[in-house]
């Protein structure tokens, strides 16, 4: 097995597609200082102040109309993450940089409050987060996500949450209030029950045990929760569909969804490098099965196909998910979020003046 960078998903930095030139370092044989020869594995945090926080989602296969991401980059380090390529827009690599160089959008709550206070804004569910996990480790200290939820509650505005982190339970007090008005739903992503694999695949996420405990905590507090198998990786996690569904049902979830892995852009290079270093005996088979499930390539950007896959293998996996949902009573859909209270709440606030 080749040397692995501990505690990280990506093992390398890929070139930024927007850069015309790339840089390589050639070491002189006379250099022996190990600290010079090895990159620091520490996470770097940078405060940024963007002009906007809401992103218009114009993808026909994504149900949310708006998303917001309090953090750019994600320390969870999921090696397959489709959002990695967004780091290139900031001048960084989709590889190690994505999980080591985290940008904190400190003014996000103020931006959201200003946007929702605008006369032209019409309520439409906002997804936290469309790209990076809003409950990644940085949230424990900076609490930007919690402040965003406070803004949503203030305006009685609907919001959705996608996370792999049990830290979401810290904010159950806010989630309960939002859920009371049907203003929130939480999607907990669970990819594997194999802890050895999870540590390699998504090294700084919560354990699967803690994620199922999160599902249970949310469900018993009447907060709508959906379990996402996102993504399913053929040959690596595709044999766990029924096991995850059974555990989701036992934890109190009433709905289950899934996506197929798609290795877009630089993520294909990162994933190939990762699996050859961490699971070399499985690498060729897994890569071939991923390509088979996406129409012959490691990536598929076709709307309607990219998340469900294409071909016989993908359809077989989709059918397994359907059978698992039926077997463990996970067919229900989360209730549609309430958009009517926002206008009533705004009118009530205006009447105070």
Image: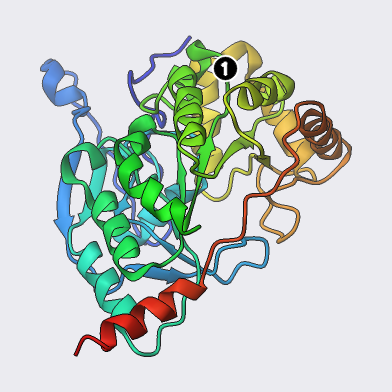
Q: Position of residue 202 (x, y in %)?
A: 45, 28
Residue in front for this viewpoint, 166 or 352? 352
Which residue is tagged 1? 193
Residue in front for this viewpoint, 157 or 33? 157
In-image side of 79 versus 247 (left or right): left
What is the quadrant of the C terminus in the image?
bottom left
Q: Position of residue 287 (x, y in %)?
A: 67, 29
Q: Is residue 129 visible?
A: no
How many numbered badges does the structure rendering display? Answer: 1
Q: Position of residue 225 (x, y in %)?
A: 54, 41
Q: Which residue is found at the position 77% from the left and 38% from the top?
A: 293
Q: Which residue is found at the position 51% from the left and 74% from the top?
A: 340
Q: Position of residue 55 (x, y in %)?
A: 42, 69
Is residue 108 placed above or below 298 in the rendered structure?
Answer: below
Q: Is residue 88 visible?
A: yes
Is residue 158 placed above or below 248 in the rendered structure?
Answer: below
In-image side of 256 versus 36 (left or right): right
Q: Which residue is found at the position 24% from the left and 63% from the top?
A: 108
Residue in front for this viewpoint, 240 or 30? 240
Is residue 152 placed above or below 281 in the rendered structure?
Answer: below
Residue neighbourhood size for the residue with mark 1, other residues' Cα within 10 Å, grouped as few (<14), some (14–19), many (≥20): some
When asked about the image quadrant of residue 44, the answer is top left
Colouring convention used in this rendered image of the protein = rainbow
In-image side of 123 versus 259 (left or right): left
When asked about the image quadrant of residue 285, the answer is top right
Secondary structure of the residue carrying tag 1 is loop
In-image side of 111 versus 190 (left or right): left
Is residue 273 placed above or below 301 in the rendered structure?
Answer: above
Q: Outermost residue, right direction?
A: 312
């Amino acid at each position: 097995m080749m040397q692995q960078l501990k505690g990280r998903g990506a093992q390398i930095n890929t070139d930024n597609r927007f850069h015309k030139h790339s840089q390589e370092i050639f070491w002189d044989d006379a250099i022996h200082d190990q600290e010079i020869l090895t990159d620091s594995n520490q996470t770097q945090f940078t405060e940024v102040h963007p002009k906007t926080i809401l992103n218009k989602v114009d993808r026909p296969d994504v149900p949310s109309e708006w998303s917001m991401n309090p953090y750019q980059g994600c320390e969870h380090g999921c090696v397959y993450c489709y959002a990695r390529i967004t780091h290139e827009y900031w001048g960084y690599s989709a590889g190690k940089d994505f999980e080591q160089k985290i940008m904190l959008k400190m003014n996000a709550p103020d931006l959201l409050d200003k946007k929702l206070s605008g006369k032209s804004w019409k309520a439409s569910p906002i997804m936290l987060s469309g790209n990076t996990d809003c409950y990644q480790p940085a949230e424990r200290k900076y609490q930007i996500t919690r402040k965003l939820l406070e803004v949503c509650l203030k305006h009685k505005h609907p919001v959705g949450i996608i996370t792999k982190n049990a830290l979401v339970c810290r904010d159950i007090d806010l989630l309960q209030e939002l859920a009371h008005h049907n203003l929130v739903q939480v999607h907990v992503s669970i990819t594997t029950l194999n802890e050895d694999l999870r540590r390699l695949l998504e090294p700084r996420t919560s354990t699967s045990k803690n994620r199922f405990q999160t599902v249970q905590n949310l469900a018993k507090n009447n907060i709508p929760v959906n379990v996402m198998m996102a993504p399913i990786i053929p040959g690596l996690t595709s044999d766990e569909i029924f096991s995850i569904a059974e555990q989701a049902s036992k934890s109190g979830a009433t709905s289950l969804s899934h996506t197929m892995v798609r290795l877009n852009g630089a993520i294909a290079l990162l994933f190939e490098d990762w699996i050859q270093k961490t699971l070399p005996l499985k690498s060729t088979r897994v890569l071939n099965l991923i390509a088979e499930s996406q129409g012959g390539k490691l990536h598929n950007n076709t709307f309607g196909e990219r998340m469900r896959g294409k071909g016989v293998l993908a359809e077989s996996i989709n059918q397994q998910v359907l059978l698992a949902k039926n077997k463990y009573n996970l067919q229900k859909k989360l209730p549609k979020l309430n958009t009517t209270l926002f206008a009533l709440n705004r009118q009530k606030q205006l009447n105070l003046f």
